[in-house]
């Protein structure tokens, strides 16, 4: 299935809160893999997750949405520590 130009140009966003965590962190990237890597780095550093199962990765991938993100990378809109 071919993506239209709008879908190709949209960045990807993953929110910790959408995974059921009480955390305002949001990972944003140029594509889903970049976004997922930022989110997994955050999960390891801040939430102490050492081993992330394939099931959890699939769940995280399923919550990634199209977005226009400013700033890029990971950020916590509520302030405080982020990675």
Image: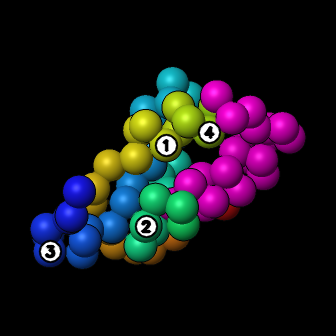
Do residues under tags 1 and 4 come within 8 Å of each other at their CB atoms?
yes
Q: Residues within 10 Å of mark 2 (few under 14, many from 20)?
A: some
Mark 1–mark 2 Cα distance, whole angstroms, equals 11 Å
Mark 1–mark 3 Cα distance, whole angstroms, equals 22 Å
- Write down the residue under mark 2: 31
Is residue 41 at all visible to an observer of this figure? Answer: yes
* Residue at 39 percent of width and 55 percent of height: 13
Quarter occupied by the N terminus: bottom left
The local secondary structure at tag 1 comes to helix
Q: Position of residue 62 (x, y in %)?
A: 43, 37
Do residues under tags 1 and 2 come within 8 Å of each other at their CB atoms?
no
Checking the image for residue 61, the label placed there is 1
The local secondary structure at tag 3 comes to helix
Relative depth, front residue between 3 and 28: 3
- Write down the residue under mark 4: 57
The local secondary structure at tag 2 comes to loop
Mark 4–mark 3 Cα distance, whole angstroms, equals 27 Å
Of the image marks 3 and 2, the number of the one nearer the N terminus: 3
Q: Is residue 35 left or right of residue 47?
A: left
Do residues under tags 1 and 3 come within 8 Å of each other at their CB atoms?
no
Mark 3–mark 2 Cα distance, whole angstroms, equals 14 Å
Mark 1–mark 4 Cα distance, whole angstroms, equals 6 Å
Is residue 78 at all visible to an observer of this figure? Answer: no
The region drawn magenta spans 35-55
* Residue at 67 percent of width and 51 percent of height: 40
Q: Is residue 51 left or right of residue 27?
A: right
Q: Position of residue 42 (x, y in %)?
A: 67, 53
């Amino acid at each position: 299935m071919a993506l239209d130009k709008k879908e190709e140009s949209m960045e990807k966003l993953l929110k910790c809160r959408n995974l059921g965590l009480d955390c305002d962190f949001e990972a944003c990237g140029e594509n889903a893999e970049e976004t997922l890597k930022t989110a997994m780095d955050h999960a390891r550093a801040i939430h102490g997750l050492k081993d992330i199962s394939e099931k959890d990765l699939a769940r995280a991938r399923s919550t990634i949405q199209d977005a226009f993100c400013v700033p890029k990378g990971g950020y916590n809109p509520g302030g405080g520590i982020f990675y």
